[in-house]
Each structure stands twice: as structure tokens, then as C-alpha cells.
Amino acid sequence: MFLIFLLLTGCCLISVTQGAGGKNDTSSDPCGVTGSWVNELGSGMELTCQADSTSVISGSLSGRYNSAVGHAKDFYKISGRYARSGTKLENCIVGFTVAYNNDVHGNSNSTASFTGNYFSFDDTIYTHWILVYHTQPGNMWLNSNMGKNIFKRQH
């Protein structure tokens, strides 16, 4: 349980490819967060956006995550969704999940779900997360940890 909490709180890095003039190229980055990011604890994540076929306003997120706090030796897969927001659709609301199962650590019997906002004015993703791990039904009150992370784009 403690290891999983450390893995999560050390969280994520994300990077984003930018077009000319520092603005995100919506043809290759329809949500504004494609690329590499790092959080305040030094954990890293890479995200890729894929627009829904009918609209660029929403779509799917995929990628990989590595924890600096838990000293993960391998990446964990990420999947989620996004929706553009703001008066000019310059921002993005994100939600994604990490299942803690990889080739090095195996199945850690836990998942973390992140939800938050990307703001283009400071090129930052502000998230809240909840980590849930396997426990017996009588101990469900013990199985969740909550927190927040702030991710900055890596150039």
C-alpha cells in the first residue's frame, strides 16, 4: 500500500509538440497537451491526443507514465479523454487513468485516476487524483488516497 502511494504521489511528466510561434499545432495536437510533462515531484508522463472523428472538441488520450517517487524502472500505460474548453477553445479538461501493471513491477493491484485542467496561458496541467488499491470488502474505507499534482511542459 505505501509503495503504491509513493508511486502515485511521485507522479507524472507530459510533453507537448508546439507549432510555430509557440502555439500548439491543432492538426498534430488537437487537445493542446500532446507531448512530455513533469510534475513538482519529478515524475514524468507522455501524452498523445486523438480527436474524435466528428469533432476536434473532444477525443481520447493515451500515453505512458513513470514515477520519480516510487523509482519505477518501467512505464505504466495511460488512457483517458479530453474536452476543449475556454471561450476560444484554448484550454482543455482532461481525465486519464494509470493502471499500475508493468513488466518490471507486475500487477500492483491499483489504479489512479487523474482529472484536471490544462491552461494555455501558463502551459500547465492542474490535476487532482485518487489512487485505489485492492482490499477486502470490509476494509474499503482504507483503499483510497487522494492528492493533486501540477504538470509543467518539457521543451
Image (spheres, rainbow, N blue to C red):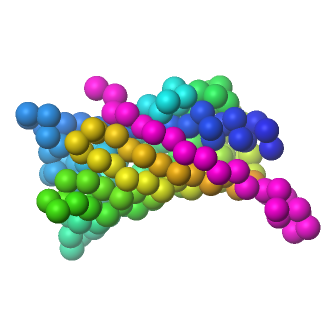
Residue nearest the viewer, comparing 43 with 63: 43
Q: Quadrant of the C terminus?
A: top left
Residue in the image at 79% along x and 38% along y: 2
How far from the left and from the top, in percent, is residue 114? 52, 53
Q: Is residue 81 shown to the viewer in this render? A: yes
State left or right for residue 59 relative to residue 79.
left
Task: Tell me the magenta residue range.
Answer: 134-155
- Residue 10: image location, x then y, percent: 60, 33
Residue at the image point whose x is 21% and y is 64% from the top = 56
Q: Is residue 13 visible?
A: no
Give the image quarter of residue 154. Answer: top left
Question: 36 above or below 79?
Answer: above
Residue 45: x, y in percent?
A: 46, 37
Examine the image and state in which quarter residue 73 appears.
top right
Magenta stretch: includes residue 146: yes
| Rendered-image quadrant of the N terminus | top right
Q: Is residue 28 magenta?
A: no
Residue most extreme to the right: 138
Q: Is residue 87 above or below residue 43?
A: below
Where residue 144 sits in the image (x, y, percent)?
A: 73, 55
Residue 86 as seen in the image, left or right of residue 79: left
Q: Please name the residue shown 83% across and 56% down the image.
A: 142
Q: Residue at x 21, y 70 (%)?
A: 55
